Amino acid sequence: PFTEKQIKVSPNPSNGNTNFRLPDGAEGVRTFRVFNLSGQEVLRRNDLSCNSFDLDLSRLVPGIYFFDADGRRGKLERG
């Protein structure tokens, strides 16, 4: 399994467009979700076929968020 330390997020903190880079061998993401501190899902993307993708987070209220990623080769840990 991969860990959140292997998933690179930049820039962090973000002011809008954020890049997520998965570790080599992850082969994309089936489901990528972003949660607020209350545990509410605030963003979801499905079937991301590459190991590096950008998400526009500018519509989210400023704060702390967590992500959860299900990779094509198994669970990618929450970060």
Image (cartoon, rainbow, N blue to C red):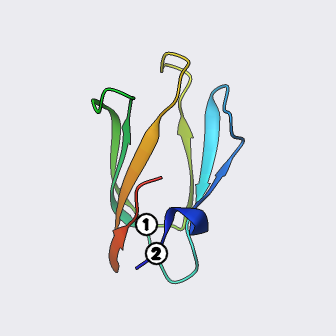
Judge from the rendering whether residue 12 lies leftward or rightward of residue 76; answer left or right: right
Q: Disc 1 on helix, strand or loop?
A: loop
* Residue at 56 percent of width and 18 percent of height: 62
Instruction: State whether residue 19 is above or below residue 2.
Output: above
Judge from the rendering whether residue 28 lies leftward or rightward of residue 21; answer left or right: left
Mark 1 or mark 2: whose residue is earlier in sequence: 2
Query: For this rendering, which residue is in front, 25 or 76?
Result: 76
Q: Where is residue 75 in the image (x, y as percent from the top left)?
A: 32, 70
Instruction: State whether residue 51 is above or below residue 53.
Output: below
Q: Disc 2 on helix, strand or loop?
A: loop
Q: What residue type is labelled 1?
A: Ser
* Residue at 59 percent of width and 69 percent of height: 6
- Determine which quarter of the picture holds residue 53: bottom right
* 10 Å crowding of disc 2: few (<14), some (14-19), many (20+): some
* Residue at 58 percent of width and 80 percent of height: 24
* Residue at 47 percent of width and 34 percent of height: 65
The residue that disc 2 covers is 2
Instruction: State whether residue 1 is above or below residue 36.
Output: below
State the CA–CA distance, disc 1 to disc 2: 17 Å
Query: For this rendering, which residue is in front, 22 or 63?
Result: 63
Query: Can residue 39 be seen?
Result: yes
Q: What residue type is labelled 2?
A: Phe
Q: Position of residue 13 (x, y in %)?
A: 68, 34
Judge from the rendering whether residue 77 lies leftward or rightward of residue 56; answer left or right: left
The residue that disc 1 covers is 49
- Determine which quarter of the picture holds residue 43: top left
- Determine which quarter of the picture holds residue 23: bottom right
Which residue reaches farthest front?
A: 38
Residue 23, numbered label: none
